[in-house]
Image (cartoon, rainbow, N blue to C red):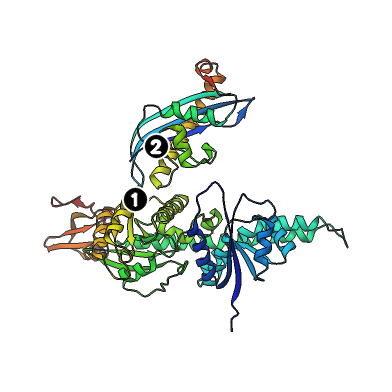
Amino acid sequence: MKREKAAVLLFREDPRDEPHPEKMIELRGLAEAAGYRVLAEISQRRGRDRRFQLGRGKIAEAASFSPEKLIFNEPLSPGQIFNITKEFEVQAIDRFNLILEIFASRASTREAKLQVELARLSYEAPFVRTIESLKKLSERPGYRGSGSYDVSMYRDIKGRMAKIRAELKSVEETGERRRERRRELGFDLVALAGYTNAGKSTLFNRLAEECVTAKDQPFTTLSPTTRAVAAKDRRFLLTDTVGFIDDLPLFLIKAFRSTLAEIVEADLVLLVVDLSDPPEVLREKLASCHQTLWDCSCYAPIVSVLNKVDRISPEDAQERCEMIRDLAPSPVFISAREGHGLADLLDMIDEKLPALEEFKVLLPSSEEGMGQLSRLYEVAEPIEVKYGKEIEVLLRGRREIVARALKGAERPERSPLAKG
Amino acid sequence: MDVVAVDISGRHSVGGRYIMVSASVAAKISPEGIERTKRIRLVPRVAESVEMEVVIGLIEDSVRGLSGVVLAEKGDLYNLERWRVESILGREFKYPESRGERRAMELAHHASFAGRKLVLRLMEEGLGGGSLKAGGA
């Protein structure tokens, strides 16, 4: 039987900042998602301690619970980890490390495993270097003691990182080719993005009539899943992606670049928001999503999906929507669990996706013309086809895709009935 | 939303003084990006220090007469809380959050950087140094 791990959570509040009790709740959620039993939560309002992050007394208090690990909300420097482990004989990790633990336990695909390993190595490399140099302080040269063994460990990590990066690059290129192929087939790409545990997978299951794992816990989804969805008179591909979290370190964003590419390359991003969060938390989470989208250079239009409206009153929902107006473009109220507001969401998706145009195409009445007509059927929606001396096709689709399907044929003419 | 994004370039000492250029971009933005750029203003300044009063003075000169919420990077204002900056500036202020606000800041950053390069070139050629206002402590 798997033994439950025990941990004490430690949280430092800056004396200049407002108290943020929700951050401790988030840390507890993360710890539980990583499989820890939380023995105690200890917080201290003070400036950063250079040696231990918190005061020595608070660390001693936490260590008195005999936990396996002390989990700090604030980032720990390599020196601080070294000091805490040495002085209190208990392992100390910070929030980023905790997130990495969750990722490592959930990674199921080869790509996700590589990404997690790259993130872990990027995080650990400077620690290894510092700890090596700290250990060397008391080290004496031994047999042929030149210290080359220590140096090689850091070098090994760097080598492994380069190898993983190369492997992930090929995964990225495969993804790029796949997206290109999907575009050629006339699909619009829509990606779900948002803070972790906002309900992205539940919404994905609703829209795509799928059953991917959706749980009330952070980071349930790590690898992207894509399914076709038909909305009104057009079809698009919807991708469920990994959730964002506050203060996501850049190395983690870089490691998950191939997954986040699904968002970056999308024609439309559905930014899912948990509207039942307290107003100030809601704002912070949204700001952190914008930050992540900016960091991964995503410039696609956004539809703000205000989820979980069934948990609050309509007045509260309206008030919160007003409060986040500057962060939530094109808002739509939904409840993914109950299935409310999905029709409005599909209407909004249809409105925000690149407009479809109507074209009249003349094809030769030959074998080649029939081949082109068959390709047009795949990528666009034919409205009317007249067979005569020539094949006259009236169709609706995206200009560049119709043009690509007709490569080598007559350029499509805009129909007089064309809209947009 | 109307914003004025401000960025200061040259907050490092060159020969014991700070040759700075503040760029302010008055724009109408949406949460997703910039809808319309209304005006870009560059204010050059040579100072002996980059203390808070100097920075605030430069930002005040830079945004004077431009309407909208003032935006600036946290580092430019020494990570002061929003309410403190608002009370010093005496007008609505915020740190960038949305993608549109960040885009406006990026534009201001490019403008201030290019403006400073121009100022340095003019100073090198001995053309514009006299018109720079000396300020600060």
Q: Position of residue A375 (x, y in %)?
A: 26, 64
Q: Is residue A6 depicted above or below B116 in this figure? A: below
Amino acid type at circle 1 is Met
Given residues B6 and A8, the one toward you in this image is A8
Q: Is A224 situated left or right of A238 in this image? A: right
Give the left or right position of residue A131, taking residue A233 as reference: right
The answer to whether the residue labelled 1 contacts the one labelled 2, judged by CB atoms less than 8 Å apart, is no
Image quadrant in which the N terminus of chain A is located:
bottom right
Q: Nearer the viewer, residue A206 or A208?
A: A206
What chain does mark 1 sit on?
A
Count of picture labels: 2
Q: Are marks 1 and 2 on the same chain?
A: no
When the figure is inspected, residue A411 is found, relative to residue B91, above or below; the finding is: below
Is A92 in front, or is A140?
Answer: A92
> Helix, strand or loop at disc 2?
loop
Q: Can I make out residue A399 in this image?
A: yes
Judging from the image, mark 2 belongs to the subunit labelled B
- Residue drawn 74% across and 62% down? A87
Spot occupied by residue A286 in the image (x, y as percentages of width and height): 41, 54
Q: Residue at x 50, y 16 (%)?
A: B131
Report the amino acid beneath label 2: Glu
Q: Which residue is mark 2?
A: B92
- Residue drawn where x is 52% and y is 16% of the image: B127
Q: Residues within 10 Å of mark 1 (few under 14, many from 20)?
A: some
The residue tagged 1 is A323
| Disc 2: CA contacts within 10 A as few (<14), some (14-19) or many (>=20) | some
